[in-house]
Image (cartoon, grey):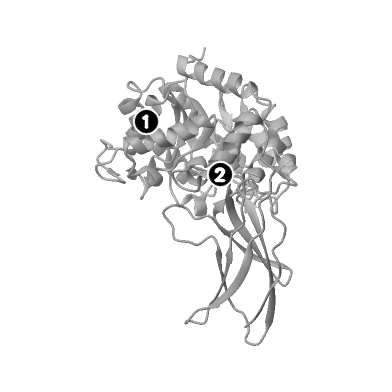
Amino acid sequence: MRRVSLVFVVFVLLCTITYGSTSHPIVKGTFIQEWLTVHWTDEMWDSELEYLKEVGIEFLIVAPTGFGIGDGNLRTIYPSKKPNWTDYYPGVDLLGNTLRAAERHGMQVVIGLNMDDRWWQIGVKDPQWLEGQVELGNQLAEEIYNLYYADYRDTICGWYFVFEIDNLMVQQKNAVEVLAKAFNTHLDFLTELDPGLFFMWSPYMNSALATAESYGRFWTELFREVRFREGDIFAPMDCVGGGGTTLENVARWFAEFRKAVDTKPGLLLYSNAENFDHTDWTSATVGRFISQLQLVDEYVDGFINFAYPHYYSPNIIDHGFHKTYLTYVQTGEVESQPPTPPRSIQAVEMPDGSVFLIWEGGEDDVGIAGYLVYRDGRFVGKTQTPRKNAEGYLNAFAEKNLREGRTYTYVLYAYDFAGNLSEPSEEFVFTR
């Protein structure tokens, strides 16, 4: 019989009871990448985790903990004791910092294992290479477990498989066979190491490359061959932020994932909801993000997110994103009061020949997140409140490739953190 640890039971109960206690879907876990935290003090960690707990987030996913630099070699985010593994950040134990902070705040941590950029070129085409990566991940898991688990039994709750599987890769010959062998090698080892720690992975999809039905069939076939355990978590990225799906078709993909997961008793289905916009790597409006949760809610057992600390944290970006999402968490509603439109638009020609549009901002009860710019009736770009460590001006837009002697007509809209749009500005006509 599989031994189930107390920490695993507590985690499942928390996700089931707490998630079920609200009438609206909310995120319970979020990724946090090591580069963001490398200079964080205890005070910064405490500030960040308080924000996360405030919106109902209960666990962190830190991944990867090892970066491939050649066969058998890793650069780790903790001080490894292996002779052929080196510190990615010498003198800094980022994994230990994460675990210590999570323990202070009663949160849990899912530990991502190794990643190698050669995955994107090799994938399942070289079974021997992939098997070697899995064996390397097993070594990494064993060292991490031996170094940290005794001190963080109530904090470490699972493992995360970092290599991202996509619906183009799985069309290759023998993909099921190759991935099944790799997963089973991994799972058998992790189960022997500690059967109470669940396993999570997060594939993605591009709806232009295949159908939801074909991807669902692939996972059904793979689940038949792989020894996934009760409580393991299949957490596909919803890919709305990354452009692989849209709000119009994302539910269809998760409906197929649900069918596949239901063929594997005990396996859980989560959505990895993306709160960013790949077109310019800005934060998604909270209204769009909530739509992503609501559209797939009927199909999933829970939600994780890439990534609250990176795109909604008040430590990184304007407090308005967090405030707007917090209102939703507390009430189940997204605020709907639109901002007033921008005004007093001007064009400023710079010495280098470039042109900047500038304007006076609109007003909003929570705050302005950004502006949409239309030229001659066509959308040409947006501005958004910048990340705190970046340069940028919310009320300015750089125009490019304008022709001499041509007249252009501009209309701007303000949008708030929920995504509510203002009325259009007055037209601004500019001759280059």
Q: Taking 385 as reference, is 209 left or right?
A: right
Q: Nearer the viewer, residue 152 or 67?
A: 152
**Residue 427 in the image: above or below residue 178:** below
Q: Secondary structure at mark 2?
A: helix
User: Mark 2 or mark 1, which has the lower sequence index?
Assistant: 1
What amino acid is at disc 1?
Ala
Q: Which residue is mark 1?
A: 101
User: Hey, which quadrant is residue 73 in on the image?
Assistant: top left
> Does residue 111 appear anywhere in the picture?
no
Task: Name the residue beneath numbered marker 2.
Answer: 321
Q: Which residue is at the front of the view, 283 or 68?
A: 283
Q: Quadrant of residue 96?
A: top left
Residue drawn 51% across the image and 30% down it: 54
Q: What is the x, y in percent for residue 408?
A: 68, 77
Please indicate whether residue 154 sits to the left or right of residue 263 in the image: left
- Residue 385: give x, y in percent of width and height: 53, 55
- Residue 235 to residue 368: above or below: above
Whether the residues at callouts 2 and 1 have beta carbons within 8 Å, the answer is no
Residue at image location 69% in from the left, 43% down from the top: 336
Picture residue at 60% right of the left edge, 35% below the top: 327
